[in-house]
Image: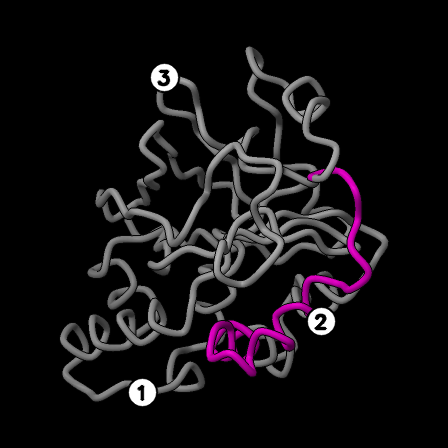
Amino acid sequence: MKTKLFFFVPLFLIFSFVSCNEDDSMEESQAQFKSFNKPGDDTIFDIVEDFNALGEFEELAAALVHVSDAGLEPDLLAAVQSNEVQLTVFAPSDLAFKELYATLSSVSGDEITEITQIPAPVVRDVLLYHIVEGRRGSNSVVPNKNNKNIETLLGVPFQVNKDLEILDVLGLWNPVIGTLDPDPNAGETPGTNANISASNGIIHSVNHVLVPLTLQQIKDLYGV
């Protein structure tokens, strides 16, 4: 039986999905890294837009706009522009999206070169899989030894291991870009790509689009 994993819920309800790891609470792990907790001047979306000039997050910005233009709930574009909530975004780079387009092209048999060719519900679910409630610096994401589940706004977790790798539903350990590392000095420039502090959360750049469904499920459910 096919089960769609996306949720048609109001924006204010999506922030109840996440709980902190019981043996390493966010408050305790972040206490010694005040730079993670200090909000920046710009929102998450402002930073994404700024990084577009560097060829970093143009596709991510387009994905947020694609979902918003389709009128789907929750409106993630509004969320990352708002200071009413705090979010942590694992932000795929432009190269990550291009890798995804190539993979989906091979599955669908059609050439996919931009985000608007992918049905908006698929894009919305993938984006929800990259967003976590609250401000989570890398020190509260990367485990000391055992793999850590990170609950996402989609309600489907991914795992992070001590080697700074992320395991998504596709079952591949994806190394992250740069230094997703418990370092309070990371995130000051685009080159480090972790702990980028926004007024409404934190951004960690990743070099793969994390996928919450198998490729066959995506094809079956959404006709990609």
- The disc at residue 113 is 1
Q: Residue at x 68, y 30 (%)?
A: 33
Q: Position of residue 156 (x, y in %)?
A: 45, 41
* Cα distance in 3D space between marks 2 and 1: 25 Å
Give the residues drawn in magenta, as a range.
Answer: 36-63
- Do residues under tags 2 and 1 come within 8 Å of each other at their CB atoms? no
**Which quadrant of the view contains residue 199?**
bottom right
Whichever of labels 3 and 1 marks the residue nearer the N terminus, that label is 1
**Residue at the disc numbered 2:** 46
- The disc at residue 96 is none
Amino acid found under the numbered disc labelled 1: Thr
Please rate how many residues cluster around mark 3, counting C-alpha atoms within 10 Å: few if below 14, some from 14 to 19, many from 20. few
Please rate how many residues cluster around mark 2, counting C-alpha atoms within 10 Å: few if below 14, some from 14 to 19, many from 20. some
Amino acid found under the numbered disc labelled 3: Lys
* Cα distance in 3D space between marks 3 and 1: 39 Å
**Whether residue 121 is situated above or below residue 40 in the rendered picture:** below
